[in-house]
Image: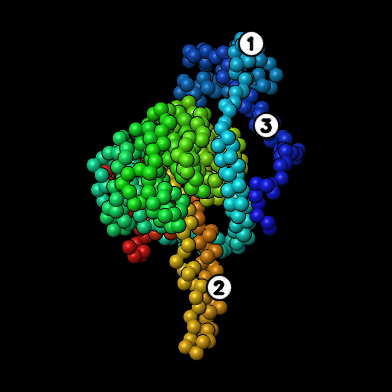
Amino acid sequence: MSELTYDSLMDDGNYLGSERARMENKVILDELERKKKARNLAVPTDDNKVKARLREIGEPITLFGERAADRRDRLIYVLSQINAARGDDHTMEEASSEESEEEGEEFYTEGSLELLQARRNLAEFSLPRAQKRVAQQRIDSKIPLGRIIDIRKKVFAGVKRFSNIGSQIGDERPISQVRFAPNNKILATGSWSGTVKLWNVPACTTIRTLRGHGDRVGGVAWHPQATLTQEEGLVNLVSGAGDMCVNLWSLNSDAPLSVMKGHADRICRVAFHPSGNFVASASFDTTWRLWDVNSSKELLLQEGHSKEVYAVEFQGDGALIASGGLDAVGRVWDLRTGRTAMVLDGHVQGIFGIDFSPNGYQIATGAGDDTIRIWDMRSLKALYTIPAHVSNVSDVRFFCADALPSFKTKAESADVLMNGITEDTDADKSHDAEDDIQEWKYRSGLYLASSGYDGYVKLWSADDWQLLRTLTTDSGKVMSVDLTSDGELLASSTYNRNFQLFAPEDVPV
């Protein structure tokens, strides 16, 4: 199969060509129209009048556990269904023609030539990565069920052995976020004191303290090739803080390489694009922004949330970005076109953590309603709701197996006897190595970690969404969590200025 590129991509405008697709699209549009009309229904606010109206139309006046606000919402829903069935809008309030025109009018903001080129670059980067991901998923779909069961048992058995191996005071104030470097040997911590620190792990010794922010650091993120192929003097790390600045850092200087300004309020989470050429930042000014790393310029100011934007994360392919706000709504954006790909509407309190699964089509969101919701972009709806913590879910992270497994290099060299003849067991070793590599590729995205303000870090299976392991910390509030790409370490940061390291009991550290 030839590599898919931007130039070879066929522009098929008939994406709704099938009858089934047209029908599904019509159902979605009809439901959106019904909800839009329901918002304009004239419904009494007095609970006794709501009950009387429900009795009048033959509906139960109350349901078990139903509150007055819920009862009114049910009346609105029932009336909207009745009106939709009749094709009758006589109970709706009439809006002025001018307001209707304003409501229906779309507006566009002209983008720069730099943004246009960036969108093309994003498409060229993401298309071959998506093609390889789908090809690997097709291979994984052919794995026998018995083999999948064995892999799950082995992986989950290792996850259940995670235990605390140490705790370290990291700063003078709460540590807002922790993130492992791509080589899994360095941990970055961002603190409310305005500093970013780099630590050797698991030794927990300080490498460097990065000072450049004047207010609390809300988020840190590593360049995808930092500590691997990226030179130390180049951009390796990004941070965002309450001073409304996004700072780019190298690994050999305490001062930032660049300070990017533009936000009008404090910055929370930040994220590096998989290409390493772009950075995203979420802010309390109700926007998230896309920055060019090479020029340190703002490429895109994206609105779409009614309240503060807290979390932002890129998809592994690099085509999509997800944002989560304190309006309890998440949005998935197509970076190549600028359009909204999906609205994550279901939480009842603000979203604090968001992450894409390595499979590319599932998203996890953690919110102040104590739940984690799993969203499926294929069906455009919530797949599962996990009652995760008894207080705010502060962070969610899928396990992403990017690192090369240690057994791969060992398996590539066969044992050779002194006379130059290989051992008879080489064929068996090669077969075992293939099984190990197959297992390693399949385990990526097989589980996820969450942190909460109840003081716990929890590990969940990512296929049936069951609890695998609960880890206790030394604080009442866990601010963030992260996993290494080799699956051997887990880190969490807490409100009491500490960060903790966890590892499977049988893994030497």
Task: Indicate which disc, 2 or 1, sits on the residue closer to the N terminus.
Answer: 1
User: Tag 1: residue type?
Assistant: Ser
| Picture quarter with the C terminus | bottom left
Q: Residue furthest bottom?
A: 419
Q: Of the residues tagged 1 and 3, which is closer to the observer?
A: 1
In this rendering, would 9 be left or right of 200? right
Viewer-closest of 477 and 297:
297
Sort mark 3 into few (<14), some (14-19) or many (20+) by Cα contacts within 10 Å.
Answer: few
Res. 97 mark: 1
3D distance between C-alphas at marks 2 and 1: 72 Å
Residue named by callout 2: 431
Mark in the foreground, 2 or 3:
2
The circle drawn on residue 27 is: 3
- Tell me which numbered mark, 1 or 3, is placed earlier along the sequence: 3
Q: Label 3 sits on what residue type?
A: Val
- At x 52% / y 29%, what residue is drawn? 304
Q: Position of residue 72 (x, y in %)?
A: 51, 19
What residue appears at the point 65 percent right and 55 percent down from the top-left corner?
Answer: 3
Where does the N terminus fall, quadrant-wise?
Answer: bottom right
Looking at the picture, how far across and down is residue 498, in whole percent? 27, 46
Say what amino acid the circle numbered 2 marks.
His
Gap in angstroms between the C-alphas marked 2 and 3: 50 Å
Disc marking residue 477: none
**Mark 2 against mark 1, which lies toward the viewer?**
1
Give SS at disc 3.
helix
SS assignment at label 1: helix
